[in-house]
Image: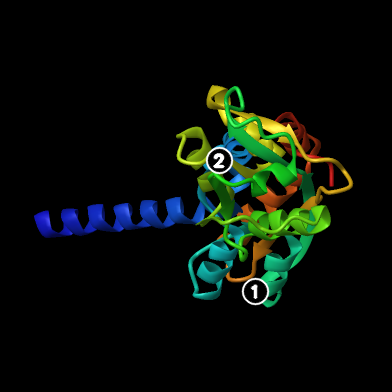
Amino acid sequence: MRTRRWLGVVTVLALVATTARAETVTVFAAASLTGAFKTIGKEFEAAHPGTKVEFNFAGSSTLVRQITEGAPADVFASADEENMEKVRALVASPQIFAGNRLAIIVGKGNPKKVANVADLGKPGLTVSLAAPVVPIGRYAREVFAKAGVAVPESSSEVDVRAVATRVAMGEADAGIVYTTDVAAGGEKVEGVAIPDALNVRAKYPIATVKASKNEKGALAFVRYVLSPEGKKILVAAGFLAP
């Protein structure tokens, strides 16, 4: 009898675990979406009782590699169309859901008096940039090209949040990030605007992953991001309309 009872318990626990996994939506999202998507995740869970959203935030190029290698993901949100295109055969119907702009990030009070993109090339300035394969790293290099300024010697960070963190911690004097990262940086940093003529408009696409184990939940999450409620959260975080 004890054996049967334990077998029954194990079976029930297995069913509960399977149900929990089926109700989890795993979202792979660009690092710059961290704050906004965490808020969207909480609101989505509240609107869909019994559903849990789990996030994997990283540079879009890193997420592409993980998805290509078979990492379990239900939704992919990239900071650029180029990385989404790299997994185009693995995702369904990408849609642009937000935009962003670039800004120079400096420490509070701007101690090195950085006023423009050209100043980032001055001797003695420690600059932090994301690696060229990361969207913000590529965008930053486009800004330098437009400004006619050589890309300065810099760190090569894995994502935009790493750039912002280095400046916030005083390990770098300046860097180039999205305007939303300056806003999310708190009291330790501030931004220096990049003129429209030199700036880049980033486009963020989102799509469900074809190999998703929770297609229904994945579609529901994408719909929520594209909904008026989702857009309101994104705008509040500083993102631009698609």
Q: Nearer the viewer, mark 1 or mark 2?
A: 2
Residue 115 visible? The answer is yes
Distance from label 1 to label 2 (Cα)? 31 Å
Viewer-proximal residue among 200 and 141: 141
Residue 238 visible from this viewpoint: no
> Which amino acid is tagged 2?
Ala
Number of disc labels: 2
Left or right relative to 234: residue 27: left
At label 1, the amino acid type is: Leu
Coordinates of residue 136 in the picture (x, y in percent): 66, 54
Q: Which residue is mark 2?
A: 164
| Helix, strand or loop at mark 1 | helix
| Residues at discs 1 and 2 in contact (Cβ within 8 Å) | no
Rendered location of residue 99, percent (x, y): 79, 46
Q: Residue at x 89, y 47 (%)?
A: 197
**Residue 81 location (% of width, % of height):** 75, 63
Q: Does label 1 or label 2 sit earlier along the sequence?
A: 1
Circle 1 Cα neighbour tier, 10 Å, few/some/many (<14 / 14–19 / ≥20): some
Most extreme residue toward the right is 197
- Specify the quadrant that holds the N terminus: bottom left
Residue at disc 2, secondary structure: helix
Q: Nearer the viewer, residue 182 or 89?
A: 182
Q: Residue furthest front?
A: 123
Return the residue at label 1: 90
